[in-house]
Amino acid sequence: MPVDLSASIYAQYERARKRAREAERRGASAEAAAAYQQAAEWMRRYATDCTFDVAVRQQRLKRVEALEGAARRLEGIATAGPAVVCSSRPQLDAPAGEDDYEAEVLGLIQRTHVQWNDIGGLGETKAAIKAAYGLALARKPKGVEISSWRNVLLFGPPGTGKTILASATAGSLEATFFNVKVSDLLSKYFGESTKLISALYTVARRMNPSVVFLDEFESLTPPRGSGESGAERRIVSTFLAELDGLESREDESFVLTMGATNLPWLLDSAILSRFQKRIYVPLPDELARLAILKIHLTRRGHKSQVPLMELARRTDGFSGREIEQLCQTVVTHMTQRANPDFLAVVDRGQEALRAYEIQVEPLTQEDFDVAFEQIRPATSLETLRHYEDWMRKLEI
């Protein structure tokens, strides 16, 4: 799987842009011009290397033009000397800031190549999500209205596949994927969170079909009346307006919001009511665990002396992420066993490593025993009962 460098490239762009603005405020025109030019180069790379969407690439290249224009203007000021006074700030740093917020949102877009067959189990969950965007995008008979939901809440224990479900939804639909962390919205660097939220949905509608994935959703919207600040209340109100807007829109744009939480009982009741579809993503059952083991072992070319069905039974209570970690630990132990002199090769440097071919052997009972000693399930029976109790309350 190719390494996705988009986040690193975008971070370099933001650092250069911040240096440029700070230098411009100090009146250091030559320094600001150089920093704007650096920002332009990073944004050009971000535009050409980190997106498959033509519309996104064009928006980013327009940003490059604005940055280069700011650099040229400041170079002229620096060359002319102190007698020349800057009469106005560059367009890309305009007080209105809408373009800036949308530029931040572009940094939340991620490429995803995950497909449904990359997920083991969760057949009913995948079917429910497929139905959501299928009903929204398929043509309706004339004179017939068929409503579909656009807001989905995924809840369940940690590591059960909520993030990968959102990735697969976007990847299978070939949709623009906005992978949003709560910290991205609440960070002081982004300015006012409410403006960023509005910009997020503005860009998502423009680049539809889109999937907006909001992870750790309970941290963003604490229950009302729990001592939250005015800023937190405004964030909740903004989300309510955007989620309501998705349901009431009459155009053909498709934006699917997928909220994910490990603690659904902490969600604000008003926002919870906006999610027409709430999907419990449970710990994998035996057949699902078998499918996950095949994905991480058989599909990757490994052979096991221990029957996978036996391992599926032994991993009862494990999450999908814990099974993945178990498989990684098993393979690591096998490579250490099959390559006893490998560390000596590492000490000889890069050329020796590049010439060395890693030896692999079938995975043994010992490999799995070592892994099971290190990786244990973290979700308790009490926690699982809490999810069941919460779901029963929803049905009342």
Image (cartoon, helix red, strand yellow):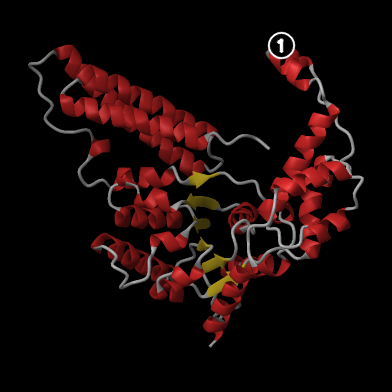
Residue lying at 53% horizontally and 83% vertically, measured from the top left: 393
* Vertical order, 71 against 97 (above or below): above
Farthest-out residue, front = 373
- Image x and y of residue 105, in percent: 40, 47
Q: Name the residue under label 1.
A: 348
Q: Is residue 44 visible?
A: yes
On the picture, is 370 further left or further right than 176? right
* Vertical order, 338 against 277 (above or below): above
On the picture, is 278 further left or further right than 63? right
Q: Label 1 crowding class (10 Å Cα cut-off): few <14, some 14-19, many 20+?
A: few
Q: Give the quarter of the figure containing the N terminus.
A: top right
Q: Is residue 140 visible?
A: no
On the picture, is 35 further left or further right than 47? left
Farthest-out residue, left = 83
Amino acid identity at mark 1: Arg
* Vertical order, 335 against 384 (above or below): above
Residue lying at 53% horizontally and 72% vertically, measured from the top left: 149
Quadrant hosting residue 21: top left
Farthest-out residue, bottom = 396
- For mark 1, give the secondary structure: loop
Of the pair 187 and 17, the residue shown nearer to us: 187
- Image x and y of residue 30, in percent: 23, 17
* Vertical order, 165 against 69 (above or below): below
- Image x and y of residue 2, in percent: 65, 35
Residue lying at 69% horizontally and 53% vertically, measured from the top left: 376
Quadrant hosting residue 89: top left
